[in-house]
Image (spheres, helix red, strand yellow):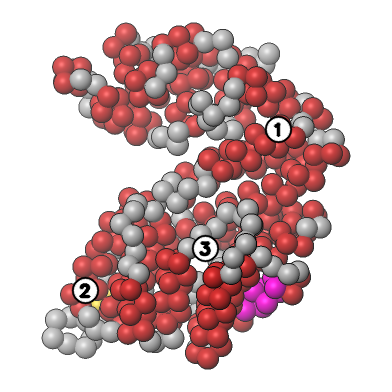
Amino acid sequence: MVDIDVPIWAARLRVLRRGRLWSRRELGKRLADVADEASRAQLPTLETLTGMIRLWEAGETRPDEQQAELLCRAFDVDEAELFVGDAAGTTLWHYLTGIPLLSGRFTAEEEERAGRAIEAPHRADDGTVSYFKAILDAYTRPEIRPADVINALRPVFAGIEEFHRDASSPVRQAFLLLAAENAELISRMHHEAGDPDGALTWSDEAIRDAREAADTLLMAYTLAQRGGLADTAGDPGRLVDLAVAARERTHLPPQVDALSRHHEAQGHALAGDLDMCRRRLEESAQSLAEPGDDTHYRFDCSTEAHNTLCAGCLVDLGHAMGAIEILEQEPPKARSSYAAAYALARMAHAYADAHERERSVETAQQALVLARQTGALRAMRELARVHIPPQGARHRRRILL
């Protein structure tokens, strides 16, 4: 077994925290939450507690009895599992690779087999593929902050890449397809996190892997998603070209066809072509209404997402009232997600362009709060484009974020 420079219990503490996507500060808050009133009164400040957690994970100090009990409550494990345990091998390979540990999701045998495959990729089999697919599914949820998804899935991608290079031929293709999907998801999360360069870099990786896999449907999907990364007026023709190229490669399932037409409509809107934009939006709605779509790709094809994109196109075309009509028919749901934050930002933009000052201010404030909570920097960039006319005037001023 490879030696590490921290005790196994300290490594396990870090692995458990990172698998739950908690920062040290977040873990400190949770320790206070699970403490009873008397114990909470004895806890140090959050800043001090965060520093203590750092020392614990480095193995420089060990939690006392009370702190250990709180840690077990926060992680919902017993003390033996956290501080003793017999899964040193599992802890070790998660610690060394950074691949997140999903507590309770896999059996001890499945964890051991995955660890052996990590150590020797030629041992990978269909079970290893299923293991990594489950991890990808677990972190594909809109309530997770985009930056947290990126941090969780980067090491997963690295592991998958090694498998599709070195695994035996029966499963190499499956890992290549999974690598493309993983890279595409990381790309979109960079987009939502306000990092356009990172988004394009990971999109390039997804397209390369899809091309190497010679999977025409996956290639079309990655091209269609690439078209959605540009939400400025820089190169609307490029958006249209990518969307059209996606549809030319193969017969697409309805949801992927709708995705392609969504992004083509966005390109036409940015280019100021109202007729083509409306035509593609109508076609995308028709595709979404078709039954029998069994695509497994991970993207939001809901009515709400469709309406947000339609309204955004109308905002870009200067038809604010039409955007408001759509958004008020299907207002963003009050859930904490980067998608809801962006929808609210688009609504604030529409209200501002329609000179609905009070509504714009109120909606922009809601969007800003939600964007900060969810790490939705794309929504914050949209808010930076919103200009609200002062009371009683038709001039505009920029929202100060």
Res 129 seen here = yes
Res 156 seen here = no
Q: Secondary structure at mark 2?
A: helix
Q: Quadrant of the N terminus?
A: top right
Q: Earlier in the sequence, mark 1 or mark 2?
A: 1
In the rendered structure, which segment of residues is drawn in magenta? 238-247
Q: Residue 295's quadrant in the figure?
A: bottom right
Crowd rating for badge 2 (residues with CA inside 10 Å; few <14, some 14–19, many 20+): some
Which residue occupies the extreme right position in the image? 169
Three-letter amino acid code at the position of disc 3: Cys
Q: Is residue 240 magenta?
A: yes
Q: Which residue is at a point 38% across and 31% down the rendered structure image?
A: 24
Check the image and report above or below for 54 versus 5: below
Q: Which residue is at a point 69% across and 67% down the rendered structure image?
A: 252
Prevailing secondary structure of the magenta residues: helix
What residue sits right under mark 1 in the picture? 128
Q: Which residue is at a point 66% across and 65% down the rendered structure image?
A: 253
What residue sits right under mark 3 in the picture? 301
Can you give x and y, in whole percent of width and height, for residue 182 in the image? 63, 48
Q: Which residue is at a point 51% across and 54% down the rendered structure image?
A: 189
What residue sits right under mark 2 in the picture? 359
Check the image and report above or below for 273 versus 160: below
